[in-house]
Image (spheres, rainbow, N blue to C red):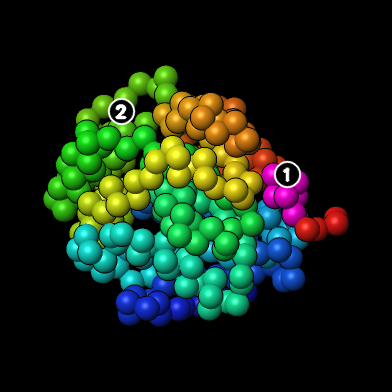
Amino acid sequence: MWNDEHFLTVSDGTKIHFRDEGGAGEPVLFVHGFTASIGGQWGRPGLIAGMMERGWRAIAFDLRGHGLSDRPHGRSAYGGNRMGLDAIELLDHLGIGRAHIVGYSLGAHIMAHTLLDHRERARTLCLGGAAGRWNWTDAETVAVNDEADELEAGGITRHILRLWPKDTPKPAPDELQRLSERKLAGMDTVALAGIKRAMPDHKITRDDMCSFTMPLFGFVGTRDPQLQAFHTLQQFRPSTEIAEIEDATHGNCPGRPEALDAVDGFLRRHSERTV
């Protein structure tokens, strides 16, 4: 799928792993979610391969703390705009002024926050599985800190249960433990805890979302607990286009062919391409 692996050392000294493929098509930057990676989120064949086959230039990177990128410890390595600035610095490195931005889950939250200060870098913004942190509450701050505590102790069960598919029975304790161990295989749980503790920094407002002038798109599975947030987003920002992927969960939505068709179709409607 990809020709080469690349690394960029960003301004704070962190090394970021990225891939760039697709030739001369309009650039699309993919930003994955929590505990994912380039391959883990976008899959094989998945969304990126499909977009490349349809003529787009696909660019993706492992968020700091994930994949082959550096995994610094501590909240400060992930706080403020830092994770989103890695995306902006990657675009700078590649000489790309404006790109279509596709973020999934944590990647969607990061880019909705970051683009408030870098709107000129986005041709379009696609939010997958997360609609931006305009609905963040104090209770969620408590919850992510509890999840960070569990991560530092080597578990991720709270995170799994929070995103468990709608209308699906919760797993038994022994199955939940196996899911936790499988999800954390090869991960740096201390780095992940730092990311969790920094999540409140991505808070934005409804007015912030309404201030975006670039075309805005959301795609979400009908079994994803985040579905209602997209409905609410469309209510207060009616120009937002939404694609609901039937029977998809938070975890499998990006790999569904309907998601590929939806994202590709949206970008084509807002593209300079003629074919």
Could you tell me if residue 39 is visible in this image?
Answer: no
For the question of whether residue 152 can be seen, the reply is yes
Where is residue 66 shown, x and y percent of the image?
36, 62
Q: Secondary structure at mark 2?
A: loop
Q: Is residue 274 left or right of residue 210?
A: right
**Residue bounds of the magenta highlight:** 266-271
Mark 2 closeness class: few <14, some 14–19, many ≥20 residues within 10 Å: few
Q: Disc 1 vs disc 2: which is toward the camera? A: 1
Magenta region, main secondary structure: helix
Q: Are marks 1 and 2 in contact (CB under 8 Å)?
A: no
The secondary element bearing badge 1 is classed as helix
| Left or right side of 275 for 163 | left
| Residue 268 belongs to the span the image colors magenta | yes
User: Which quadrant, please, contains the C terminus?
Assistant: bottom right
Q: Position of residue 225 (x, y in %)?
A: 42, 29
In 3D space, how far apart are the residues under numbered discs 1 and 2 (Cα atoms)?
36 Å
Q: Which mark is residue 265?
A: 1
* Image mark for residue 171: 2
Q: Is 201 placed above or below 7 here?
A: above
